[in-house]
Structures are given as structure tokens and as C-alpha cells.
Amino acid sequence: MGFGSYAPVAGWAKLSRMNNAEIAHIFDEIADMLEFEGANPFRVRAYRNAARIVRDLSDSVETILADPNRDLTDIEGIGEDLAGKIATIASTGTLPMYEELRAKFPPEVLALLRVPGLGPKKAAALYKKLHIRSLDDLREACLKHKVRELPGFGAKTEEAILEGIAFAGTTEKRIYWADADLYVQALREHMRTCREIEKLEFAGSYRRGRETVGDLDILVVSSKPAKVMDCFGQFEDIYETIARGSTKMSVRLRSGFQVDLRVVPRESFGAALVYFTGSKQHNIILRGMAKERGLKINEYGVFRGEKFIAGKTEEDVYAVLDLPWFPPEIREARFEFDWAAAGPLPKLVELSDLRGDLHAHTTESDGKATLEEMVDAAKKRGLKYIAITDHSRRVTMANGLGPERLRKQWRAIDRLNERLRGITILKGVEVDILERGGLDLPDSVLAEADWVVASLHYGQNQSRERITRRIVEALENPYVSVLGHPTGRLINRRKPYDVDLDQVFAAAKRYGKMLELNANPARLDLDDVACISARQHGIPIVISTDAHSTEGLGALRYGILQARRGGLTKHDVANTRTWNQLQKLLGRAEKMPKKTKKKEARHH
Ligand code: DGT
Ligand code: CA
Ligand code: CA
Ligand code: ZN
């Protein structure tokens, strides 16, 4: 799910090594193509999982392979077969089966899969029956009403597809923040070798923590711009230099991703940082405010006539306009100027504020690490509690749990809790919100849980009314704690399902429930805008990883960025509290983890 449509440049693999995101991207594309081909869903899933595992790794595959004391198969979820494939990709840049699939399905064809509402089956039908080979073909076929004549399509689907083509077009060139961050880390490392650099900062959407990043914008202070650009040009991932001037240079990386570098004078660094961090809308408002004061603001500084009056630091620039320094995440011209007008800015939530994780999977369902491994890793990360929330039985694909297996797991958690110090394990479940409405487990089972995540996985194409009703009813259930990934979107891949969030907020408020900000970099659901609304409604947000491996627990930082973009403070985020305090926020207040009944009650 990594790089949108960035196809690796032909022959690029031989130029240099592959980073984790690029390896993951190959697995994702294999999964896409297998899906398109109509392959066995379990096989498709295996490649999706492989992508996720590689993307979640905290070390680069290269580092692991280079270390004689380490082996890829030591990592949970990586067996011999996958380790072999990863090693092949790392050394050759590709896999034979990947090349075969790519010969069959060129990128233009696969673009069809990015159209929301076009699952792989429908996309394949269009490809086979109407010989549609690209988004342009598809648009034309829709306009000529050829699509609605295919069995299983109809006029409504055709309209939805036509709408979706625009969406597919806009998501093409943006990558996940988490993937951009891999480039940022590598570039920081590389630029450290350059002695002429006084200061360096990544600006743009990356600095604002936007969920996807279009390109990277590096700002450097140096009195030797040419030397800095020479050094930048030696970054090993570069495929080509697009442009180079006296203080500005743009390059394209092997993946197609663009990086801009600008060298600025020391006294302009703050002004340049404000300018190139943006957002554009934020800058426009600053410019207006400057004008009202008879000033001019640009990337070099703030000026009265010809006179330079500020520019060295961001604080200086904002102070001239009687504004506080804004954390980059909120520079979107949404609420930051209202905040500033109302007084000191509220302090945004930080990673170190989080005390626990409330959504995690184990090998009992589709996770890659055992209960013990997950808990151990959570403890090492400094978390004070972790809710184990494996899937319920309806999610057969993930080997979901029925009452019996669930109670068995909860008894194991009881035993582990007795033994462990320093962390509390919460007995949880991610209960499926069924297509026909209602939950996948009886209340008598849910009542024994400490923490219940309710999530909607099936029937995502239902009408707004039905989906909203299913969710509102789930929130009404007295044992549900939180709504998981509330809109179901997958960034760049799947649009949110059609749900009336206002009604969801109202229901959460009414029943004392929380809403999740799922921190998986492909989900980030709720998104920033929805977080703003949730905050206005006074609904506690839970930032959870939805981790499927120990490495996946590292996703909290992506959730934090999105939460900050939504203006959330420590107070607004429920899992900044201790488990005891957190329970008091819930509709039902409870004591510490309950004991699971030894005797199996009978259900279904
Ligand atoms: P991206 O790269 O599409 O994810 O988003 P940004 O925000 O990084 O946009 P980018 O790379 O085009 O430009 C970086 C910043 O430079 C942007 O956030 C604000 C500033 N900027 C760019 N173009 C303009 C402009 O026309 N007017 C103003 N005021 N600022 C601009
Ligand atoms: Ca940018
Ligand atoms: Ca740029
Ligand atoms: Zn989950």
C-alpha cells in the first residue's frame, strides 16, 4: 500500500539498495495483481501481511541482512519462504513472480484497482469484457454507458465509478507519511556527512504531519550552497536531477518520489521555514495580516518597506504579527488563528502522554506475535496497559474467535496478569458489527471483557442509513467501549464507507462511548478533520495501534501526528489516562480486570 502508482524506474534496482518501504511496495503490488487475477484470497492476504511486516520493521532489511548474528526468520511472522523472497528483493530489486505479473498487468491496468467501489473482481470484469486498460478507457466506457450493461454493474455503479475515477487520479502521486519518513531518516543520515551545513530542517507537508506527502522540502542554512547541493546529489537513492540553480535543487528518487532542497541565508531561516512549511492557506492568511500592518512577508523575512524586521526564527516572524509560534501540525488555516485570538494555545497531545494501547492482535486471530510477545513488547515500549483485541468469529479470514476460544484467551490473560509487574493486560475483543446489524458475540460474553472495540468490516457498500444505523446500534450496546476505525477508509485505496458521522458523534455522546483514532499509517481513522468535530462534541478519542506484530506497536506516533492535526490535547485523548481513570470515562465504570469465569457458560 506504499507508493500509489510509483512504478520503480526501469533498471533502477541495479543502481542501489532497496529500503523497507520499497520492498513492502513490491509485496503490495503482488497482492494487487493476484487479487486482480482472482487468486486464492489467503494467498493474496499472505502478501499483504508480508508488506505490513516489512513496513513495520524498525530496522532496515539491509541492516538485518548485513548482521551475521541476525536472521530475517528471527522476526515474528517471517518464515523461510518469506525471508527468501525478501532477500531476493533486497539483492536483485525484484522477484521473478513479480516481473511475470507485471508483464501481464501493466500499471495503467492496475490503476483500475484504485477506483473506489471497484473491487478486484469488478475491475477484472471490465478488463476482460470491455477491454478496459486504463482510467481513461474506463471514463470513456462510463460516459458511453457501456459499463452499466455488464452483469452485476447497473447505472448506479457506473455513476459511482465515474466519481471514483477522479479520486483515483488525485491519490496517484502521494505517499504515506510513514513511508516519507523512511526517506527523511535516510536523507538526514546522508546529509550529516556534509560539513557545510549549519542547519537543516524538513518543511512542507511532512513537517505538518499530513497523512500523505506529495514531495519533500528540505531547507538548509549554509554559506556554501554549491557544496551542499553537490553533497545532496550524492544521496544514493537519487535517480535523476530534475533541476539545479544557485540555491535550489530538485531530484527524483528511484521510486519516482521528488525531493526539493533550498539553501537559505541564516537570517532568513525562520521566514523560509514558515513559508515552506505552509500550508499554502496558512501562508495566505499570514500575508493578509502582514499587509494590514503595512508589512510584507515572504520566504526571506518580514519587511517594512525595504527594511528587514524579522526572519531568523519562526518565533520572530510570528511575533511581528502578534501571533504565537504554531506547532506545524495545525498550520492548516482551520482553527489555529481562532485559537490564537482566544488566548494562549492549548498544548497538543504528545507521544509521551500516552500510557496504553487499546487495540492489538495476537496469533489467536491474524496477528504475528503471541500474547506474551505482544505484552512484553508493549512493556518494553513503556506502556502501562494493553488491550488484547483479537477479531471475533465473523472475520473468518482472520481466524476470528468465538466465545469458547475467547474465554480461553482471557483465562490466559488472567494468569499472565498475576505473574506480570508493570503492565496490565486488558481482556478485550474486536467484535464485528454484523451486516444485518447487531454484534458478532452475545452480551453475556462481552460483559466479561474489560474493553470492547466494535468494528465494521463487512457490508461496507450498504446505504448511508443502514451503515449509520448499524454503528449507532453498536454504540448503544452497554458493553461496547469504543468504535474501531470509524469510517473504514484505507488511505489511497478505499474511500470511507458512507456514514453520517454527526449521528455517530451524537450516539457516542449519548451512550458515553469513545471513538478510535486508528494509528495504522494506512488508516489514520478518524482523520484530522473528524478529530476536530469529535473534540467539539466532547467525545474522548482513543489512539490505538491495531498492531498485528510487536513492531506494529510503533504506530502510535503516526496517530499522535494526526491527533495533533485535529487539535487534540492530552485531556481529549482517553489513553493518556491510567486504566483506572479511563474506565471512569466510559458509560460503565468498572474496577480492575475482571476474572474470567472458570466454568464455560453455554452460548451458541
Ligand atoms: P505536498 O508536497 O503536496 O504534500 O504539500 P506541501 O504543503 O509540502 O506543498 P509544496 O511542496 O508544494 O510546497 C511547500 C510549501 O511551500 C507549502 O506548504 C507552502 C509553500 N508554498 C508553495 N507554493 C506556494 C504558493 O504559491 N504560495 C504560498 N503562499 N506558499 C506556497
Ligand atoms: Ca512538499
Ligand atoms: Ca515541494
Ligand atoms: Zn483490529
Image: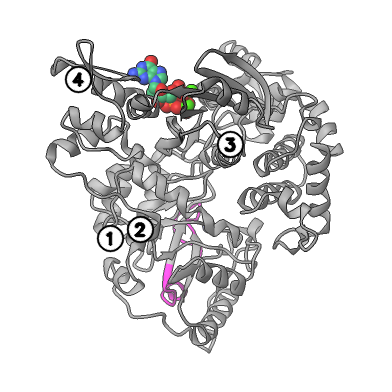
Tell me the amino acid under the disc marked 4: Ala
Picture quadrant of ligand 1 = top left
For marks 2 and 4, the one nearer the N-term is 4
| Side of 217 relative to 44 (left or right) | left
Report the residue marked by disc 3.
187
What residue is drawn where x is 77% and y is 47%? Answer: 40
Q: Quadrant of the image for the C terminus? A: bottom right
| Secondary structure of the residue carrying numbered label 3 | helix
| Side of 96 relative to 234 (left or right) | right
Given this view, does label 3 or label 1 mark the residue nearer the observer? Answer: 3
What is the CA distance from the residue labelled 2 to the residue labelled 4?
Answer: 48 Å
Tell me the amino acid under the disc marked 1: Tyr
Mark drawn on residue 389:
none
Tell me the amino acid under the disc marked 2: Leu
Tell me the amino acid under the disc marked 3: Leu
Location of residue 377 with respect to 103 vertically, above or below: below
Report the residue marked by disc 1.
511
Asked whether the beta carbons under mark 1 and mark 4 sit within 8 Å of each other, the answer is: no
- Residue 132 at x, y = what percent? 70, 18
Asked whether the beta carbons under mark 3 and mark 1 sit within 8 Å of each other, the answer is: no
Given this view, does label 2 or label 4 mark the residue nearer the observer? Answer: 4
Asked whether 462 or 3 is in front, the reply is 3
Report the residue marked by disc 2.
475
Q: Quadrant of residue 204?
A: top left
What residue is drawn where x is 52% and y is 24%? Answer: 261
For marks 3 and 1, the one nearer the N-term is 3
Given this view, does label 1 or label 4 mark the residue nearer the observer? Answer: 4
The magenta segment is 432-451
| Secondary structure of the residue carrying numbered label 1 | helix
Asked whether 326 or 154 is in front, the reply is 326
Asked whether the beta carbons under mark 2 and mark 1 sit within 8 Å of each other, the answer is: yes
